[in-house]
Image (cartoon, rainbow, N blue to C red):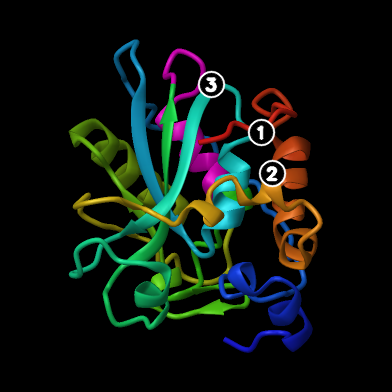
């Protein structure tokens, strides 16, 4: 990816992550026809949808979410770091692991939010300005119920007519989730004025607030 030289000099440890860009619009994904039946205990879900800063930021502003961790999954290298994943050769995707309370927010609702404001399901192996298989969009069910709901929702999306281009998001096996480096965690909360956040990810959170006011919370859930 091309990166701004001034940003590299000013924020060298951080500028290696996601390049500056203009925000895209949001779209209201359909409410799921197949809803999740989950026990009344904390559950975890994993989503891959491009640069994890924005995906983490969106889920961190949802009521019922208790933790969001940025990381890497889906590859062949054990304990990968950002530099490894950024080569696009390890098979990993930038992802987030979301811990949530199903009595307050269901898995199918998380899917609707994800495809409405966090990730474009029509972009193959990229999201916005970030290109490479490490930025692919994928749903990563953690159990049979999540797989059932995710499969039904992708099928519903394909027949909804909401998106003009084909849906390319896939369901992938869970595998091992490796938390990313500390400076990636809670990035939006720690760096609200960072150019990428301002031009790309802040719009996603605004979209969440506008489209799903009943689910939105102003506080940022850290970790």
The residues colored magenta run 101-114
For mark 3, what is the residue?
Answer: 64
The answer for how far apart the CA atoms under marks 1 and 3 are is 12 Å
Q: Residue at point 22% right, 49% down?
A: 174
* Residue 103: in magenta span: yes
CB atoms of marks 1 and 3 within 8 Å? no
For mark 1, what is the residue?
Answer: 220
Q: Tell me the element at label 3.
A: loop
CB atoms of marks 1 and 2 within 8 Å? yes
Image location of residue 119, percent across then percent down: 55, 58
Which mark is first along the chain, 2 or 3?
3
* Residue 106: in magenta span: yes
Q: Residue at point 35% right, 51% down?
A: 139
Label of residue 189 in the image: 2
Can residue 66 be seen here?
Answer: yes
Q: 87 or 44: which is nearer to us?
A: 87
Q: Residue at point 57% right, 86% down?
A: 1
Q: Tell me the element at label 2.
A: helix
In screen coordinates, is 186 left or right of 4?
A: left
Of marks 1 and 3, the one in the foreground:
1
Say if 126 sits above or below 216 in the image: below
Can residue 24 be seen here?
Answer: no
Which mark is first along the chain, 2 or 1?
2
Image location of residue 135, percent across then percent down: 45, 70
Q: How many marks?
A: 3
The answer for how far apart the CA atoms under marks 1 and 2 are is 7 Å
Q: Residue at point 73% right, 88% down?
A: 5
Q: Tell me the element at label 1.
A: loop
The answer for how far apart the CA atoms under marks 3 and 2 are is 18 Å
In screen coordinates, is 121 left or right of 7?
A: left
Of marks 3 and 2, the one in the foreground:
2
């Amino acid at each position: 990816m091309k990166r701004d030289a001034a940003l590299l000099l000013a924020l060298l440890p951080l500028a290696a992550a996601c390049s500056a860009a203009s925000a895209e619009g949001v779209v209201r994904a359909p409410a799921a026809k197949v809803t999740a039946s989950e026990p009344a205990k904390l559950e975890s879900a994993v989503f891959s949808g491009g640069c994890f800063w924005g995906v983490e930021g969106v889920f961190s502003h949802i009521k019922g979410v208790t933790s969001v961790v940025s990381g890497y999954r889906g590859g062949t290298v054990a304990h990968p770091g950002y530099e490894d994943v950024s080569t696009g050769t390890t098979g990993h995707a930038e992802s987030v692991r979301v811990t949530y309370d199903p009595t307050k927010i269901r898995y199918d609702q998380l899917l609707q939010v994800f495809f409405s404001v966090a990730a474009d399901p029509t972009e193959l192996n990229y999201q916005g300005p970030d290109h490479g298989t490490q930025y692919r969009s994928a749903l990563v069910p953690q159990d049979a119920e999540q797989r059932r709901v995710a499969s039904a929702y992708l099928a519903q999306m394909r027949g909804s007519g909401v998106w003009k281009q084909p849906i390319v998001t896939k369901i992938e096996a869970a595998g091992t989730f490796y938390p990313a480096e500390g400076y990636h965690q809670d990035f939006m909360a720690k760096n609200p004025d960072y150019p990428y956040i301002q031009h790309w990810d802040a719009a996603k959170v605004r979209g969440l607030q506008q489209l799903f006011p009943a689910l939105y919370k102003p506080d940022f859930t850290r970790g």
